[in-house]
Image (spheres, grey):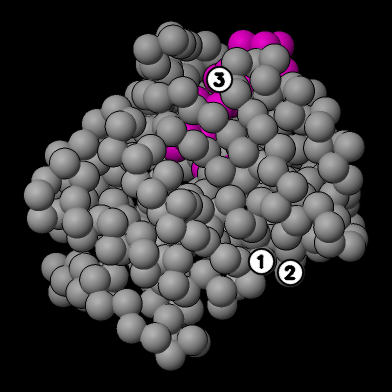
Amino acid sequence: MRFLIIGAGGIGCYYGARLQLQGHSVSYLARGNHLQAMQTTGLKVSHDELQFHEKVDAVAIDTLQQQYRCNDFDMILLTLKAGATESILEQLSGWLKNQNIPMLSLQNGVDNEPLIAQALGRHRTLGGLAVRIGGHITGPGQVQAKGPAQVIMGSWPNHQSERIFSPDALQVFADTFNEAGIPTLIAPDIRRELWRKLLINNGVNPLSALTRLDTRNLTSHPIFGKTVYRMMQEVAAVAPADDVQLSRHDIDEMFELISTFDAIKTSMLVDKEKGRPLELEGISGAVLNRAKQLKIDVPNTELVHSLLLLEEG
């Protein structure tokens, strides 16, 4: 198969390397020094179970539109920061239109798939989660990743909806991922799974950027650990705005997952350390927007979000 990775960061490059090693054709949309390094010296991915250093097909956005057609690919993987989703869909609108190639979002937050569905139609929209993986660019053309790096995906918004990407066709992609060493499951209600992941993301991502603590030190801290749990509770409180119900069991399960997972720096903490914009709107901002819609208070999320905005200036 042929895959296009839009967003050649830690997550996208790790999955791309796995697929490439299995013999699939992978193109990586990148920019700047990272793009130049990938074009000249290849891509290096370091993981406990994978050491990859190969030539890759890395392209800039102009080259993609001029030299490739959308239907040259079997699937597009979107691994950009959530805040860039709307922009990339607009930039590639002409290139993407009038095709049937599905786009799989492996991004943080719960607002990406609605944007993709609006731009491409639900029949081309796949929701997804990159689970138990930490991945970051460590230098131009170099990526470090850790964790089992699982994927959960499904037709958007769930398999009971009309005009969706065929679940049977989706199984072919899941099998391909599994054969490439990417543990993959299909979820019949991917929107609910995305909200379950938001429990973790809202619980640890903003607070880690504020405290500079990794996930293990954050969740085991006598005070911050309680705050993580409360911020997860606030996610569950606003999920009904998207017709999703999350239980106490969901909260406990996700808190246990992040508490026992390898100590990692969250993506927001890495962005903070590198002076990059934080993915606030896609994570805590999504919670605040739903809270406003439902007219309920989410004081912990509001406080952490506001403190980070104050730091950002």
Real-space Cα distance between discs 3 and 2? Answer: 30 Å
Q: Taking 296 as reference, is 64 above or below it?
A: above
277 sits left or right of 54 in the view: left
Mark 1 Cα shell of 10 Å, populated few (<14), some (14-19), many (≥20): some
Indicate the position of residue 276 as horizontal and vertical percent values: 27, 54
Residue 118's tag is 2
Closer to the eye: label 3 or 1? 1
Q: Residue 160: x, y in percent?
A: 83, 57
Under mark 3, the amino acid is Ala
**So how many labels did they put on this image?**
3
Question: Mark 2 is on which residue type?
Answer: Gln
The residue most toward the bottom is: 295
Give the magenta-colored segment's residue range.
6-24
Give the label on residue 17, or none.
Answer: 3
Identify the image quadrant of residue 58. Answer: top right
**Chief secondary structure of the magenta span?**
helix
Relative vertical location of residue 148 with respect to residue 133 in this rendering, above or below? above
Q: Which mark is residue 114?
A: 1
Residue at (52%, 49%) from the top-left corner?
Answer: 107
Would you identify the image quadrant in which residue 162 lies? bottom right
Q: Earlier in the sequence, mark 3 or mark 1?
A: 3
Is residue 193 visible in the rendered image? The answer is yes
The CA span between labels 3 and 1 is 28 Å
Residue 299 lies left or right of residue 295; in this view the side is left
Q: Is residue 222 left or right of residue 177?
A: left
Residue at x 90% of width, y 61% of height:
163
